[in-house]
Image (cartoon, rainbow, N blue to C red):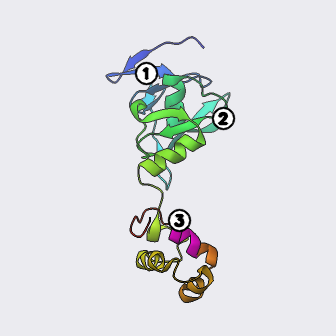
């Protein structure tokens, strides 16, 4: 597709590859030029905050994620195995400065760095409280893992992971 940057609504727009007559702005808006006059498309927000639009390609309606459309227009196609990343981990912010192609590991690291992975008592799968973890670390080496497991009603593996900081690494107290 021949790249034509257009100016509309005080903004520059780049064509979205593979989506003729659709353009993306740097700020995350999508423009359709399929009708007589161009329109900025209404975006639909999912429950987790991601945004998408419906585009018509060869007469068929297709759901297109806004962050992916912006990345395609402004950064080109991803390499094999890459996905769209929101660098600040806010899926509603689709400005090109907040977007990048990257691996799923990089995406997971973004979540960790931005504090979006629930840890400790905020984790849905936690079995111990923060105070119990601190107690366990104080008792580790004084009682066996199985004794501590019976006291706290969890497996000895759970005790070992809490005591060594494999799980509950967010609590530094009691770690050697």
**Residue 147: where, in percent of width, then height?**
59, 86
Judged from the image, the secondary structure of the residue bearing numbered disc 3 is: loop
Q: Which residue is mark 3?
A: 167
**Residue 176: where, in percent of width, then height?**
44, 64
Q: Which residue is mark 1?
A: 13
Is 93 or 116 nearer to us in this picture? 116
Sequence-wise, the earlier of marks 1 and 2 is 1
Please rate how many residues cluster around mark 3, counting C-alpha atoms within 10 Å: few if below 14, some from 14 to 19, many from 20.
some
Tell me if 12 is positioned left or right of 55 in this view: left
Please rate how many residues cluster around mark 1, counting C-alpha atoms within 10 Å: few if below 14, some from 14 to 19, many from 20.
many
Q: Which residues are magenta?
A: 159-164
Sequence-wise, the earlier of marks 3 and 2 is 2
Does the stretch in magenta take in 175?
Answer: no
Does the stretch in magenta take in 162?
Answer: yes
Q: Which residue is mark 2?
A: 81
Magenta span main SS? helix
Judged from the image, the secondary structure of the residue bearing numbered disc 2 is: loop
Tell me: residue 157, above or below residue 40: below
């Amino acid at each position: 597709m021949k790249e034509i940057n257009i100016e509309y609504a005080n903004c520059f727009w780049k064509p979205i590859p593979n989506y003729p007559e659709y353009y993306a702005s740097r700020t995350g808006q999508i423009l359709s030029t399929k009708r007589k006059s161009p329109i900025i498309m209404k975006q639909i927000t999912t429950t987790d905050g991601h945004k998408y639009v419906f585009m018509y390609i060869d007469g068929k309606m297709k759901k297109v994620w806004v962050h992916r459309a912006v990345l395609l227009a402004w950064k080109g196609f991803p390499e094999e195995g890459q996905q769209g990343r929101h660098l600040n981990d806010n899926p509603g912010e689709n400005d090109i400065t907040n977007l990048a192609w990257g691996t799923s590991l990089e995406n997971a690291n973004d979540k960790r760095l931005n504090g979006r992975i629930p840890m400790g008592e905020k984790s849905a799968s936690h079995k111990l409280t923060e105070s119990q973890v601190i107690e366990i670390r104080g008792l580790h080496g004084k009682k066996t893992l199985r004794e501590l497991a019976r006291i706290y009603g969890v497996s000895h593996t759970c005790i070992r992971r809490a005591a060594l900081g494999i799980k509950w690494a967010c609590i530094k107290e009691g770690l050697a």
